[in-house]
Image (tube, helix red, strand yellow):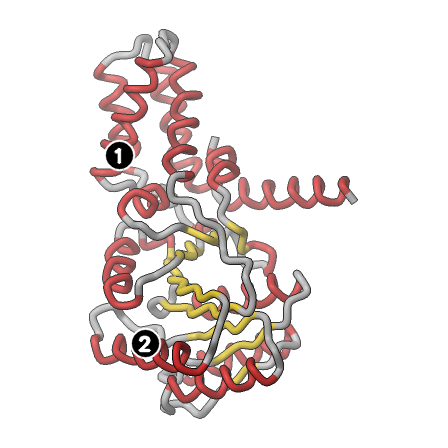
Amino acid sequence: MEDNKTENKKSLFGKLKEGLLKTKKGMMDKFDEAFSTHVKIDEDLWDELEEILITSDISMNTAMKLMENLKSEVKNRRIQEIPQVKDVLKDIMKEFLETEYVGLSQAYPIVLLVVGVNGAGKTTTIAKLAHRYKKEGRSVLIAAGDTFRAAAIEQLQVWGKRLDINVIHHQEGSDPAAVIFDAVESAKAKKIDVLICDTAGRLHNKKNLMNELGKIYKVLEREYEITSQEILMVLDATTGQNALSQAKEFDQITKLTGIVLTKLDGTAKGGVIFSIADEFDIPVKFIGVGEGMEDLQVFDPDSFVEALF
């Protein structure tokens, strides 16, 4: 049994390394070059490292904080050799991400309200979350709350059939809050462990669509005595710094509890995860490192940085 767990862990880490390959090439290869070309620890080295961070889609403020921490730790440890700076950098990056690390709630029943703009990978993320919970032996129900887009409803129905999970849905254009109400009634009647609610893939500047979220919250609060609730925002890593502005807008209205960072395998902009950890009081809870059902991984800061290095 222990061997299976170890093998599974190795397999997940292998997928993580593979999924972060583009970010590794974009960031770590440049670090390696900097460490190999400089002969002493001086301002020139610090300037080059800071520039690498900024060009890896880490915001200026976050890059400066990382560098301050790095310089301070190098001084405290009395580091003299350049190769040792790389080890310190790894430790600093882990600490930076771990300060914001909060896992997904394990209290049931739980409602996951999934928000995000169209194209971020919201529908696929819902399917992967449903698969993960079902694999853990939990009963799952999906609510197709994005009634503004017929394709969103159809996609979830297709996923529901594949995963053998019921999908509560209405017709295109119907009231999203009514869909959530029906899903809540069904979840209560069947004593469902996990209710996953889709919402419209609204753009963050469309206030009328944002108001729909308020109605959905009211339904959940009024009708469902849940043990825990997560409001997860799906962000597309390939959009880099633009993902930060989306998260800021949504958080003002929805008070997000977690972020799912998707499509890390398709971008060299994975460094944005450090800015997310720094600029928000919102933990990254899942990361997407591939197309497969198993490629949505619980975010583990330690493994993430190890995979980069």
Q: Amino acid at mark 1?
A: Ala
Residue placed at 60% from the left, 64% from the top?
133
* Res 273 quadrant in image: top left
Residue 241: x and y, percent? 27, 50
Mark 2 burial class by Cα count in 10 Å: few <14, some 14-19, many 20+: many
Q: Is residue 304 above or below residue 299?
A: above
Return the x and y of residue 244 as percentages of the image width and height: 27, 53
| Image position of 187 (left or right of 203) | right
**Secondary structure beneath label 1:** helix
- Judge by depth and name the residue closer to the eye, 93 or 58: 93
The vertical placement of 51 against 233, above or below, is above
- SS category of the residue bearing label 2: helix
CB contact under 8 Å: marks 1 and 2: no
The mark that comes first in sequence, 1 or 2, is 1
Distance between mark 1 and mark 2 Cα atoms = 34 Å
Residue receiving disc 1: 63
The residue beneath circle 2 is 213
Q: Is residue 203 above or below residue 40?
A: below
Quadrant assignment for the N terminus: top right
